[in-house]
Image (cartoon, coloured by chain):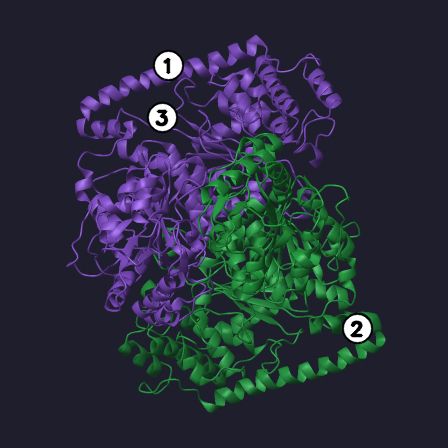
Chain colours: A green, B purple
Amino acid sequence: MTFTEIDKLAVSTIRVLSADQVSKANSGHPGAPLGLAPAAHVIWSQMKMNPKNPDWIARDRFVLSNGHSVALLYSMLHLTGFPLSIEDLKQFRQLGSKTPGHPEFELPGVEVTTGPLGQGISNAVGLAIAQKNFAATYNKPGFTLSDSFIYAICGDGCLQEGVSSEASSLAGHLQLGNLIVVYDDNKITIDGDTSISFDEDVAKRYEAYGWEVLYVENGNEDLEAIAKAIAQAKKSVNKPTLIKMTTTIGYGSLKAGSHSVHGSPLAADDLKQLKSKFGFNSEKSFQVPQEVYDHYQSTILKPGQEANAKWDVLFKEYQQKYPELGAELARRLKGELPEGWESKLPTYKPTDSAVATRKLSEIVFQNINEFIPEIIGGSADLTPSNLTRWKEAVDFQPDNTKLGSYSGRYIRYGIREHAMGAILNGISAFGANYIPYGGAFFNFLNYAAGAIRVSALSGHPVIWVATHDSIGVGEDGPTHQPIESLAHFRALPNIHVWRPADGNEVSAAYKAAFTSKHTPSIIALSRQNLPQLEGSSIDNAIKGGYILQDVENPDIILAATGSEVSLSVEASKLLASKGINARVVSLPDFFNFDKQSEDYKLSVLPDGIPILSIEALSTIGWGKYAHQHFGLDRFGASGKAPEVFKYFGFTPEGVATRAEKTVAFYKGKELISPVRRAF
Amino acid sequence: MTFTEIDKLAVSTIRVLSADQVSKANSGHPGAPLGLAPAAHVIWSQMKMNPKNPDWIARDRFVLSNGHSVALLYSMLHLTGFPLSIEDLKQFRQLGSKTPGHPEFELPGVEVTTGPLGQGISNAVGLAIAQKNFAATYNKPGFTLSDSFIYAICGDGCLQEGVSSEASSLAGHLQLGNLIVVYDDNKITIDGDTSISFDEDVAKRYEAYGWEVLYVENGNEDLEAIAKAIAQAKKSVNKPTLIKMTTTIGYGSLKAGSHSVHGSPLAADDLKQLKSKFGFNSEKSFQVPQEVYDHYQSTILKPGQEANAKWDVLFKEYQQKYPELGAELARRLKGELPEGWESKLPTYKPTDSAVATRKLSEIVFQNINEFIPEIIGGSADLTPSNLTRWKEAVDFQPDNTKLGSYSGRYIRYGIREHAMGAILNGISAFGANYIPYGGAFFNFLNYAAGAIRVSALSGHPVIWVATHDSIGVGEDGPTHQPIESLAHFRALPNIHVWRPADGNEVSAAYKAAFTSKHTPSIIALSRQNLPQLEGSSIDNAIKGGYILQDVENPDIILAATGSEVSLSVEASKLLASKGINARVVSLPDFFNFDKQSEDYKLSVLPDGIPILSIEALSTIGWGKYAHQHFGLDRFGASGKAPEVFKYFGFTPEGVATRAEKTVAFYKGKELISPVRRAF
């Protein structure tokens, strides 16, 4: 690439436009956009994308991992023709605008939500995995349906966060040559110079991960050097590339090179001199020279539209030459599942044998995964425990390792829960209906909480196979027994938190998860065997909550999830022998139950009857549905699982005793269903 | 060190004794103990420790980061004279035993709870920081009160986890030459060979962090090589050391070198042949040759007791020569705070100006930190936002960097929340009454959730300064606005989750935190200014919940925390103008409130009155105290903070409207206080 005056003008425009957004909002981060404008310009100038069709599957991806630099991204989206107006830029960080304080997935052109540091670069690893799998699955001689690159820009913060270390190590192992990360080495973080806490040799670390490392000495101005580095990175077939680029934070500002330019608007005078310095009218704001619009139109928008049109033709030909794969891909691009897939979901009768729900989950994968090719998953090194692998699975591995193939769909994430979470988000964000899942012990989802929150916020319908869901873990003890985990994730908006009680409920959980478009799922599964229940069905369970077993004129309702549902059924028999009628309610997914009509919810949990929740984890959260709670508001214990359950009173007798006390407690008192809301 | 037959016998004894524990329990992990017995023997043989006084402050520390190898640790504790009998080993992993499935802090000799991978090595960094600070503070010429080393053993799992990457990077920066980590390079994880997901160059990565890296080729047998590496590591003054030691998982077993020996007991035949191979009677279990006991008695127990006795004499002399420092240290070793410290806690009157609680927190640090020298803290690169630094603070930095001093008590953690959490635990575990704190945005405590859980489980009274506690964050938007965070941590057992409403409540939170012996604290603090409240006081707030403002015959109780308390006060005035009497209850810490008597709790939240909770985060968890909830069960929004509050209805009018609806809803209905429990 050769660069001329127009490129310089474009870079200056990006700088000034970004600073203007922050100043107009009187809030935000001007420092990084000023330093990174040249990198953004060079990267975007040679990316394959169609701003008029942001979802084009063959596009290159751009991830702004240091999401606080979002003004830079908004400038690029506006200048290159995405649907983002100058007016939108003026509304930067204002309530209800299209331009919130950090990039959000829902805005066309924003590939992933960033801001929580380390997530973006780790999402980029997921995008790169998806691209490799997509290409290995669908490319054919003469039909390169995908050869996209994944670009990311990140700062020191992203590289200090452990999640990026995990993801980068895996990216090196997986030889993701399609991944190009520009590291903004500006030597400044909020507390001051990076030398106060971060003087490791980042380049050497990335070489240790198996990355190619390149350097750009003057990222402030040297467009040629940036372009050269990117060109070289693209040639690195078997290694991801880190381009360590030295820039000056707040370049052009009077405060350039200081941490004070990181997170506050430029002073009015500073902004004026900045504009003058870059040849702009110091009194005007939001100025874009027409020739800059024209330049991006001719170098990005038009070539992108043409490439997209060519691709459309190519894909039509592909569908003729490869009708089966072509139809499959067309279906995936529409976001539809293969017809008839639901019939593959196993169902169970009460006479079927007792099975651990983690094993029932394995049966779902075994039945479904070969039928739905967009499912791609694995485990954070707990395959024999999470039971996440199906028999025909091929590992997703570089072909030259002989360990598998890029067309394989079983991912060995390694002992890296947080990166796994971010990678799931990246795979989902790639498109093509990818349905990624990851297995881990439920208790260790807290390692990935940062990424899970982004799943929910962005609406990536990823799946967590969270086995070993309670004190039923047994001997591994309290370090491995979840207590707060259900409450934690139930308190997160927009996420299914399933805790199925038997085979039908496991199938319901996966039915909901596979068909979810904008909501991730955690499926908490038992290590120990659980009986198949009378009264359960996929249709019942998918409502999130239902009457499993009823009686006339119940004296009490036992509301439970997972392993405590069958326990409640047993308790109800004991209670019956004492003349107490108990309804048993299974509530496998609060998220779906909350979406039901108030009438339905009241039919399950009506007024006038005491409701006792039974769940061998924290009782926090059950106030929504029950008057009294039997749970575990302390840490667990190491011992044989049945003994641990018994120790804490989770036996039919233990539940029955508490139910009796609950009935006695409310005798003669008026009771309002907790599902009733005053407003 | 030279090794003879008795050392070999000791190593074999460790191996067989560890395998026996797992087999007797029929549960656990024999593989790593079989491979690591030589390392454990060599490390322990030259550690300074007194098994009869496990808390001796000058001891060396040993951390088993791969906590699943716990049988190895129990063997060492038993053999070297800690209070752990053969009978205890036979009760391995049994309910109520002293020998749970993973190491737990409460057992004497266990320095930190491990099992969640990556925590132990990161705790070790905290221990090493504490040792450096302790030595720099108290050592004087001729009085080396502390020169201990921190040893850790870890496996591949620990080094894949991001938390260890973060902590190791910081350890390199801090030049922690007192830290020696043995990396068990056995090339096996649960999913199989490490080559399937982890083929980075670990040694090079650690060199990049600034560590010394040494090698032991034959960790299975070569005691001399291990000893030589440790001797060399001890000479590395300015760098922590990683000893990459190659071992065979399950060494001696028929399944040696396979992942199948990782997490299941050896087959009966295999155990027998193992015993024969190592010269033990294959029919007997839990055999310890007397000469092995004698050996450890003469090489560890007796020298340790003597060294401890000598140290006691030295410390007596020290107290005479340095009466002030000596008295301070003696006080700290007793776990007492300096007399009169409480008088330094600021108090406020309603006429004092409105101040952000993060700023009020800064005032506490400013008033207290120079008075309580065991307080040591910092921020994950958000010092200007978290306001965690006091004016006189000196950075904890290696003296040769000129950035501070090892006697400094302000830690620049870098952008490493998870490592910060694990380091807090390690500093606390060091002893000497260290009170460590760390600052971060509340929303990003989820990055550290794994470590925070261990704080609570182990009972480390560490402090999280969690600023930017709600949508009050404003423009940074939903990526930075906590929603689930309060519910998440309230559901965790044994942790204070404070959300103070004004200055007096901030002081109460710190009073509780600084005096806590076994419970960590999260203190969630506002970015925005909050008024000083009529009715608040340290004594009231420290109960966790109290009546802030009362009326006769309340029609409704408004129960709130943090910024929503003053909002509720404003709403109560609006309600009064409509003839509705509202009591306002502040509930800054559920943990302490739950510990109050039922009578007290009912005096605050009595029967018969509708209770409405007001908190601008998830409503999950409020069912414990309120009948109706006004919260935010969705993600926030980017905009000016007052506008965002208004958008979601968090205004006096918004609260009053919901209160009116609540009063109307319950009109004429019998109401039972949610704090009443049936059992």
Q: From the viewer's perspective, is residue A272 above or below residue A444?
A: below
Residue B406, position as x, y percentages in the image: 31, 40
Left or right side of A566 for A247:
left
Left-right relation of A177 to B2: right
Chain label for disc 1: B
Image coordinates of residue A561 in percent, x first then y, are: 59, 48
Q: Are marks 1 and 3 in contact (CB under 8 Å)?
A: no
Q: Marks 2 and 1, Cα distance to the nearest angstrom?
A: 79 Å
Q: In the image, what residue occupies the spot 55% across and 16% down?
A: B87
Q: Badge 2, how many Cα within 10 Å: few under 14, some, many 20+?
A: some
Say if residue A536 shows up in the picture. yes
Quote the CA–CA distance across marks 3 and 2.
70 Å
Q: Nearer the viewer, mark 3 or mark 2?
A: 2
Residue that carries the numbered disc 1 in the rendered image: B306
- Identify residue type, mark 1: Glu
Residue at the bottom extreme, as displayed: A290
Q: Which residue is mark 2?
A: A326
Name the disc covering residue A484, or none. Answer: none
Q: Quick one: SS at disc 2?
A: helix
Residue B242, position as x, y percentages in the image: 51, 37
Left or right placement of residue B476 versus residue A578 in this view: left
**Front-most of residues B431 and A474:** A474
Residue B58's mark? 3
From where the camera sits, is residue A413 visible? no
Q: Nearer the viewer, mark 2 or mark 1?
A: 2
Separation of disc 1 and disc 3 at Cα?
13 Å
Residue A288 spot, x, y in % from top left: 43, 87
Task: Say what amino acid the circle numbered 3 marks.
Answer: Ala
Q: Quadrant of the C terminus of chain A?
A: bottom left
Q: Quadrant of the N terminus of chain A?
A: bottom right
What chain does mark 2 sit on? A
Q: Residues within 10 Å of mark 3 (few under 14, many from 20)?
A: many
